[in-house]
Amino acid sequence: MKVKRLRGKALLTLAAMLVVLSGCGGNNGNNANTAETNAPANTTNTDNTATPAETNNSATTNDGATNTPAEPAKEPITFKVQVNSTTKDFEGTEVYNEIVKQTGVTMDLETFDEEKFKVQLAGGDLPDIIQVKNINTTYLKQMIEGKHIIPLDDLVKSNGPAISAPIFEKSLAYSKKFWSNDTGQLYVIPVQIGSAGWGFDQQTGFNVRWDYYKELGYPEVKSIDDMVNVLAQMVEKHPTNKDGKKVYGTAIWNDWGTWGLSSMGLVTNSGEPVVNDYTDIPKSGFWATSEFLYKAKQKGILDPDAFTAKYEDLVTKASQGTLLNAIATWPFQNANAELLKEGPDKGFVTIPLDWGFSWVGGSTIAGWGDRAWAITSNCKDPARAMDLINFLSSEQGSRLIESGIEGVHWDIVDGKPTMKPEVVALAAAGGDPWKKTGINMMANQQGLSDNTVLTDGFPVNLFNTPEVYATKLNSLNKDYSEHYGVAYPAAAYKKYADSGQVKTLDVIPQDIQAAMAAPPDDIKRIQTKLDDLITKGIPEIVLKSKDDADYKARQQKLIDKLNDAGADEYYQWKLKAYDEAKAKFE
């Protein structure tokens, strides 16, 4: 799946994330930022151009046409590739098979798992190619100093023509300056560089059943209290699913580090580059989430598995019809495909709020800080590994990932690369037929952001055009768009950002955050202690508080513990690290 595009812990104010995001497969065109990092952005930049991809067996002209192979195909090879978010479900899809065809490289995918990664790193048993998670933590330092990953400077010169293009020049310089452990060498290749836009629909925020929301008369949602009350009313009207199982209002998933516990920050984020997320209650994603879950518990609508469920558990609950809300539409994608068969307005959507924060937008040369490519010292053929990374980074590879295969999923029509209507219809319908294409499932690995304009004058993601938006509407998002008086779903939220009522990633200095130094050991120990306290403390507060007064007392007791454990010391270190990175960056 594709979860676009949360960017890791670098996005300190949004969430200490993990992401990922088990790669949530998603509708094309939404530019979410993979969690845990403050990253990229969204603004179509017509100056972002890259030379056509030069791969080991094909070349692409500026009009997008694929020519006869530029050189003989190389011998097939298989690499173990550890990716962030994307899952093995991508293997065998049409886009995956095309990558194999174009590069001769078969990817044996494994999704990043922190505990497994620690074991692999300690034993010197890393896969051939990896994406570096939480790049501004100690992992990168450990891997460089331990020679677990190799310098890529010479490989880019010999096997990285697309990465050597002008569009990557600033990104590679950034990587050498901030992500090299002060060696000045190139160890990691950024992904998702460029600008990002709103896309077709907004996937993070207050997500609910649209038909149930209509049933309530489209109530205003101005606060966390309103969110909880809306969900409580929905549960009251629909207490069980079709099989008689109890329906719950909300839950979080807990297998993305502390991301789930801070996820309400995707709505309430203050937009400040550095906050004390542990003890500054008004600005904290942790405490916004805690408040939301506590009030849901008081209303009797909190899923009893709220603090133990994993991402896939929420996918299952959504498909069973026993869950009415999560912080993103990703877990509801399978459910939406089935619900549409039951009625034209049935399914989950993001309600546009006229306040707070919307996790979309921005631009970056650093890309997504918890996705950058590295080649390990275990790699059996580094040159071929670079061939693969070069292809995935290129214009051709980026468009393949987001738009599919030329001649199969899109064609050149009157000189313009254009999605085929039947493929747009597949995307709107969702389900297994759409998943089989593989389009959008590897968004966490492409080199160029969706809205980057290529040398043919059109964006990476060919779904991101008004023409496609007009044809992509299914009955659910058409009903939604008509209610808000907009042409496509994301425009309902976008108008509040355009008017200044809603903040977006455009106000977040993502490249500076991604350049912050890794915490020293003493600060890392403090952070680990703080995360442990918050991870264990919030569930206890939410589940055991008898009333608001008891909640406040328990909250203060935990904050006292967090302060004793060094919350302010950690915050002061972050402030200093941010200021130092900003000075170097500017």
Image: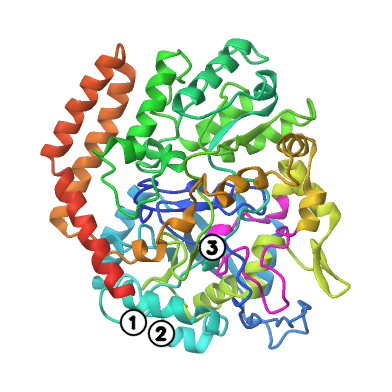
Q: Which residue is mark 1?
A: 185
How many angstroms separate mark 2 from mark 3 (CA)?
20 Å
Query: Are there few (<14), some (14-19), or many (20+) residues within 10 Å of tag 3?
Result: many
Q: Amino acid at mark 3?
A: Gln
Q: Is residue 575 above or below residue 44?
A: above
Counting residues from the start of the chain, the first of labels 1 and 3 encountered is 1
Q: Position of residue 164 (x, y in %)?
A: 52, 84
Q: Which quarter of the picture shows residue 541?
A: top left
Q: Is residue 227 above or below residue 544?
A: below
Q: Which mark is residue 445?
A: 3
**Relative to 198, is 191 on the left or the right?**
left
Q: Secondary structure at mark 2?
A: helix
Q: Nearer the viewer, residue 475 or 535?
A: 475
How many angstroms separate mark 1 from mark 2 (CA)?
7 Å
Residues rendered magenta in the picture = 436-465
Q: Which quarter of the picture shows residue 194?
A: bottom right
How many angstroms separate mark 1 from mark 3 (CA)?
22 Å
Reply yes or no: does residue 439 show up in magenta. yes
Q: Which quarter of the picture shows residue 263?
A: top left
Counting residues from the start of the chain, the first of labels 1 and 2 encountered is 2
Q: Secondary structure at mark 3?
A: helix
Query: Are there few (<14), some (14-19), or many (20+) residues within 10 Å of tag 1?
Result: some
**Relative to 158, is 58 on the left or the right?**
right
Q: Position of residue 104 (x, y in %)?
A: 63, 74
At a point 50% along the width and 75% down the height, the residue shown is 385
The extreme right residue here reads 414
Q: Which residue is mark 2?
A: 153
Query: Do we see residue 157 in this rendering?
Result: yes
What kind of secondary structure does the magenta stretch mostly adopt?
loop
